[in-house]
Amino acid sequence: MSWTQKEKAVREKRTIEATKKNFMGSAGKLGLIAQTLGHQIIRQGTGIMDVTYLEDPYDNDIETEFEKTISGQDGPQMYQETPELPEFQDEINFYEGYVFDGLSRGMHLEIKYWNRNQKLEVTYKGYQVYKEIGGELFAYAPFDDWEDLITRLYKVAKPRSKELKEQREVELGEKIQKRKSTFWEKLQTRWGV
């Protein structure tokens, strides 16, 4: 049996074990702890400053014309095409995910959940003990030390999750009622209905 086959067999066993313990996904124990007990990861930027790539310094599409001198050399700049300025808002917040830092609770444990690629990472005492990206398991070291902490945190996070869900449902209901009332008010003021 080759090393890749052995690794696939171990990965499959660990995936089954993580699924049995309800660790997998954002709805699992780890994702629930990060979302309810953790804090949001917020990236701030603007339309001009928000660049996630490096621009090519040699890509110069700006057309420039120079006045010719008697000797045929380029003289002072006569015309330069100005690029369009991008439209932007003053500040934009991007909600990247959630992070739970257990040091405030006396636990050397950190859980991160990233929304963009559904990446879930757990580090315990500085070592990565769990890593999942898009539902596929990349690392899982089942030790009782950190799993017992997860069980304790889950007991706290479960009721808090229900409270937050109920609160979101109430807020959504209020928004819907407000939109309904403004719609009827607009209809009444415009058309007298």
Image: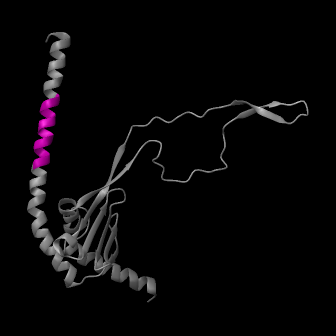
User: How many marks can you see?
Assistant: 0
Front residue of this view, candidates 108 and 28: 108
- Residue 103 image position (x, y, % from top left): 22, 72
**Which residue is at the far bottom?**
1
Residue 165: give x, y in percent of width and height: 13, 52
Q: Quadrant of residue 158?
A: bottom left
Residue sitting nearer the eye, 91 or 131: 91
Q: Is residue 164 located in the magenta-colored stretch of the structure?
A: no
Image quarter for residue 152?
bottom left
Q: Residue at x 34, y 79 (%)?
A: 11
Q: On the image, which quarter does residue 72 sit in?
A: top right
Residue found at x 26% / y 76%: 16
Q: Is residue 191 above or below residue 65?
A: above
Q: Please provide percent x and percent y for residue 156.
A: 10, 67
Q: Does 80 sit above or below residue 153?
A: above
Q: Position of residue 186 (x, y in %)?
A: 19, 18
> Farthest residue in the top direction?
192
- Color encoding of the figure: one colour
Left or right of 39 on screen, residue 151: left
Magenta stretch, overall SS = helix
* Name of the residue lying farthest toward the right: 71
As drawn, 92 above or below 23: above
**Within the magenta stretch, is there residue 175?**
yes
Screen quadrant of the N terminus:
bottom left
* Residue at 14% across, 70% down: 153
The region drawn magenta spans: 167-179
